[in-house]
Image (tube, rainbow, N blue to C red):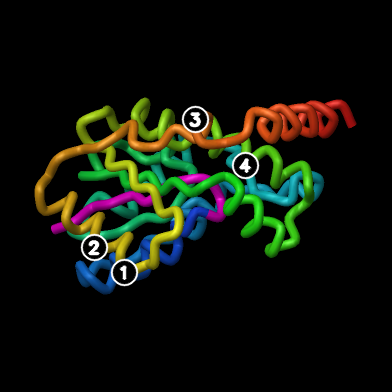
Amino acid sequence: MVRLVITGTPGVGKTTVAMELSKTYNAPVVDINEIIRPVLKWDPELQTNFVINEVKARELISENLGGVGSYIIDTIAINLIDKSLIDWCIVLRLDPRQVMNRLLRRNWPRCKIIENVLAEVVGSSLSLAIDVFGRDRVIEVDTTNKGIHEVVNHIVNRLTVGLPIIGIVDWLDKLDTDLVLSLSKELDECLTQ
């Protein structure tokens, strides 16, 4: 039995990794958005869905996953998942410059790209994972310049050993300070529009 949630900033490869892990473990990939569709509302300005009732969203997820033995979830909304439903939270990390390139290729709005790149810089997905699931059930994986099979093999090996790992990535040590300041200034401009 495997009950995993794969999370990380948009563009880090969550869906691809979840699909490969699904094959490896013969476990279904659960689409949380389908489960909570009754409590999602589209925001055309932000170009994303948002949850209008978090309590109901949590109930829907618990009802749908409660009796299922194995599954893999790919989502950024890990705060909606009761920690009793998850054995391990896998947090994918990716060099923020590569995140930016991937989101640019998706033609996302510039402000949304900057917000997500900065979220990756500061590790907001990892912080949330630790808050929700605790340090002892989080595995952080740097996917930078790694192929899908290398990433999946790394995750499988970590799960086999059964040891958490966090703190392997610090983008602030690797990025040019001017780039981070420039992105931060650009985000400030986005927020004042």
**Which element is circle 3 on?**
helix
Extent of the magenta region:
1-11
- The disc, 1 or 3, on the residue closer to the chain's N-terminal end is 1
Is residue 9 visible to the viewer in this orientation of the structure?
Answer: yes
**Which element is circle 2 on?**
helix
Instruction: Assess disc 1: are there few (<14), some (14-19) or many (≥20) residues with their C-alpha within 10 Å of its C-alpha.
Output: few
* Horizontal side, residue 104 vs residue 75: left or right: right
Q: Which residue is mark 1?
A: 149
Query: From mark 1 to mark 2, how far is it between C-alphas?
Result: 6 Å
Extreme residue toward the right, this view: 193
Q: Residue at x 21, y 60 (%)?
A: 70
- The disc, 4 or 2, on the residue closer to the chain's N-terminal end is 4
Q: Are marks 1 and 4 in contact (CB under 8 Å)?
A: no
2 falls in the magenta region = yes
Q: Which residue is mark 2?
A: 153
Seen from the viewer's position, the closer of residues 56 and 20 is 20
Query: From mark 4 to mark 2, how far is it between C-alphas?
Result: 26 Å
Looking at the rendered structure, the kind of residue marked 1 is His
Instruction: Assess disc 4: are there few (<14), some (14-19) or many (≥20) residues with their C-alpha within 10 Å of its C-alpha.
Output: many
Query: From mark 1 to mark 3, how far is it between C-alphas?
Result: 27 Å
Q: Residue at x 62, y 42 (%)?
A: 117
Looking at the rendered structure, the kind of residue marked 2 is Asn
Query: From mark 2 to mark 3, how far is it between C-alphas?
Result: 27 Å
| 156 w.r.t. 58: above or below | below
Instruction: Assess disc 3: are there few (<14), some (14-19) or many (≥20) residues with their C-alpha within 10 Å of its C-alpha.
Output: few
- The disc, 4 or 3, on the residue closer to the chain's N-terminal end is 4
Q: Which residue is mark 3?
A: 173
Seen from the viewer's position, the closer of residues 179 and 88 is 179
- Image location of residue 192, percent across then percent down: 86, 26
- The disc, 2 or 3, on the residue closer to the chain's N-terminal end is 2
Query: From mark 4 to mark 3, how far is it between C-alphas?
Result: 15 Å
Quarter holding the C terminus?
top right
